Amino acid sequence: MSRDHWSGKDVLSILDFSRQDLEQLFALADEFIRRPGAVEKSLSDRIVATAFFEPSTRTRLSFTTAALKLGAKVVDLSPDASSVMKGESLHDTILMLEAYSDLIVMRHPSEGAALLASEVAKIPIINGGDGSQHHPSQAMLDLFTIKRLKGRIDGLRYAILGDARYARTVTSLLYGLSKYRPASVYLVSPEGLRLRSEIKATLEGFNLETQELDKIDDVLGKVDVIYMTRIQKERFPDVNEYERVKGSYRIDKATLVKAKGAIVLHPLPRMNELAYDVDSLPSAAYMEQARLGVPLRMALLDSVLGRTKK
Ligand code: CP
């Protein structure tokens, strides 16, 4: 399997990768799942740095676990305990991480921070989320989960429920879906959480058709994948704007009675929008989605770093 297109590359946006690249990544992740005992320690001489300027459980820890499983060592910046607190610039912080490691996985509240890091550092940068813009490894994970659980990505009907305005997971998933041929994509949000016009225009340029709806009831029973997101409270420029949409959507076990055969995904963490009583349903796939983060990110690290020369 050729990983040439991944080797040494920055992973800033899923848009930078073709469908064929993604399929190669998924095949490698499948291989790691199928033959866990045969995983090569392909990163045994490598050091992966994590630098999360925003909180994270899944992205940071699944990248760390993935790196350790491939034999790499991991150093963590922990911004609160670093010289970032003394005012050190992102530019200089990235230069230091470049001096100490072979690849940086970073998350930052500012859109474009990962791009800036990639311009400063010669080693690969993996964007673990930059503001409301991109979260490429999450979108790769979402598509991988759908492929594993539904057998395909093409031809399915998708309902994406929640914060299409600020959730980078939604934007990145839509960018990922634009490389496939979904049968339909419904964006279900209240007025204040609709997709930003510039993202809509980008998607139209990729010929990905979306339909905006107010209520999930309108499409339950007509979709194969329900992708939930929490309201990104931390991204609202005005607390009043948040107060207007707070609690405006929620699904629970009773809601899903009509959702025949659909799987429920959520990048997590969840708040009140996804009731705990959904967890017992066979359609609840979000914990499996989070678990698949390890093999998917193993495939990503191996593809980017496993074959590069030091
Ligand atoms: N899905 C996701 O990005 O989760 P974390 O914020 O916990 O990394």
Image: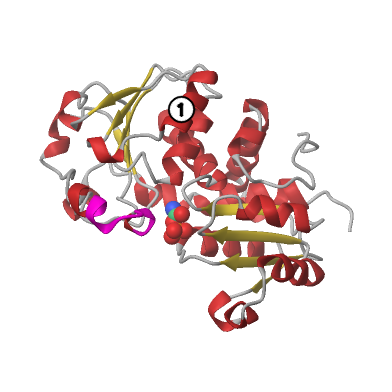
**Residue 264's image quarter?**
top left
Does 265 appear above or below 84?
above
Q: Quick one: which residue is furthest to the left in this view?
A: 254
Give the secondary structure at mark 1.
Answer: loop
The residue that mark 1 highlights is 151
Q: Is residue 158 magenta?
A: no
Residue at point 63%, 74% (across, down): 77
Q: Residue at x 67, y 70 (%)?
A: 89
Magenta-drawn stretch, dominant element (helix, strand or loop): helix
Q: Position of residue 115 (x, y in %)?
A: 67, 50
Tell whether 252 sits left or right of 153. left
The boundaries of the magenta stretch are 234-242
> As rendered, which of 174 and 71 lies closer to the eye?
174
- In the displayed structure, does residue 269 sit left or right of residue 309? left
Residue 39 in sight from this viewpoint: no
Question: Which residue sits furthest right?
Answer: 309
Q: Residue at x 21, y 27 (%)?
A: 260
Q: Name the quadrant of the N terminus.
A: top right
Q: Point out residue 276 in the picture as x, y percentages from the top left corner.
A: 20, 55
For this rendering, which residue is in front, 239 or 78?
Answer: 239
Question: What is the image's colouring?
Answer: secondary structure
- Tell me where residue 23 appears, x and y as whole percent: 62, 31
Q: Position of residue 148 (x, y in %)?
A: 47, 35
Question: Which quadrant would the C terminus be assigned to in this image?
Answer: bottom right
* Amino acid type for the residue under numbered disc 1: Gly
